[in-house]
Image (cartoon, helix red, strand yellow):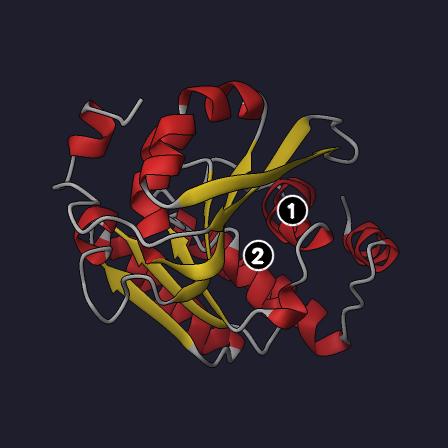
């Protein structure tokens, strides 16, 4: 996907990018490739693939969820900033918080944010399990998102404790989303969530399946969750 196709496809979805925003995406790509030579941020470095599989794919959540009504978003395990930084570029009003367990990635994100001139961005070097216990972050975000971090039963325990009641957990998945939701049903309910809808679409050009899972936070998460680091993955709530 070249830049013109990227701009055109987003416009079809009602997202118009200014010259400044397009320039931010160009800089994002350059910085990503530059830093990727020093650390492993992504296996994808071809420009057209980055625009399709990282930038466009990240923004796809906004095809189904109205981000103009959202103020705060927390991205769990964002790695090189996906999906929250492309969303922030498209919706500059967003207050973005990213939590990632690798300090090198946090250094990259701090540098990236500064170079792109992004405001209201906060990056935390932490495990999601301990981050979700902190009073200043627990149940305080309109949307918490994660992209291909773990299966739903695990991901729910990392993300739902951070979502405010009335907010949403938005999981970005490739295939098998419905199967994951079946095994994660107990975890979602236990943690105060209720699945609203799974939005499915096909990524342009490569025609691979994508799913956006929207889970409503209908009640508070019990205090004992998330459990200590590593436990959700070893003993998922299934």
Element assignment for label 1? helix
Residue 142 or 30: which is nearer the viewer? Answer: 142
The image quadrant where one finds the N terminus is: top right
> Which residue in the protein does label 1 denote?
47
Q: Is residue 13 above or below residue 93?
A: above
Q: Tell me what residue is drawn at x 35 percent, y 71 percent.
A: 122
Residue 90 or 19: which is nearer the viewer? Answer: 90
Q: Residues within 10 Å of mark 1 (few under 14, many from 20)?
A: some
Q: Could you tell me if residue 113 is visible in this image?
A: yes
Q: Residues within 10 Å of mark 2 (few under 14, many from 20)?
A: some
Q: Horizontal and vertical percent for residue 123?
A: 32, 66
Q: Tell me what residue is drawn at x 48 percent, y 21 percent.
A: 182
Which quadrant of the view contains residue 57? top right
Asked whether, in this view, residue 160 is left or right of residue 93, the answer is: left
Q: Is residue 191 above or below residue 84?
A: above
Q: Horizontal and vertical percent for residue 65?
A: 66, 55
Asked whether, in this view, residue 87 is left or right of residue 146, the answer is: right
- Contact between labelled residues 2 and 1, with CB atoms less than 8 Å apart: yes
Q: Tell me what residue is drawn at x 52 percent, y 52 percent.
A: 83
Asked whether, in this view, residue 223 is left or right of residue 95, the answer is: left
Question: Which disc number belongs to residue 29?
Answer: 2
Q: Horizontal and vertical percent for residue 171?
A: 50, 42
């Amino acid at each position: 996907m070249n830049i013109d196709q990227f701009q055109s496809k987003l416009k079809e979805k009602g997202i118009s990018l200014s010259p400044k925003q397009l320039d931010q995406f160009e800089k994002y790509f350059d910085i990503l490739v530059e830093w990727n030579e020093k650390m492993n941020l992504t296996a994808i470095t071809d420009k057209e693939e980055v625009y399709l599989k990282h930038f466009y794919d990240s923004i796809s959540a906004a095809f189904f969820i109205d981000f103009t009504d959202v103020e705060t978003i927390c991205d769990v395990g964002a790695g090189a900033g996906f999906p929250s930084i492309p969303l922030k570029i498209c919706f500059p009003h967003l207050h973005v918080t990213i939590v990632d367990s690798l300090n090198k990635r946090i250094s990259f994100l701090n540098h990236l944010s500064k170079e792109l001139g992004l405001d209201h961005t906060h990056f935390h070097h932490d495990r999601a399990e301990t981050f979700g216990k902190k009073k200043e972050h627990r149940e305080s975000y309109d949307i918490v998102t994660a992209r291909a971090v773990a299966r739903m039963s695990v991901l729910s325990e990392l993300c739902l404790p951070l979502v405010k009641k009335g907010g949403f957990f938005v999981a970005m998945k490739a295939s098998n989303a419905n199967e994951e939701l079946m095994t994660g049903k107990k975890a979602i309910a236990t943690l105060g969530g209720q699945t609203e809808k799974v939005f499915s679409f096909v990524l342009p050009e490569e025609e691979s399946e994508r799913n956006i899972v929207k889970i409503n936070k209908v009640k508070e998460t019990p205090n004992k969750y998330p459990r200590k680091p590593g436990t959700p993955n070893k003993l998922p709530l299934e």
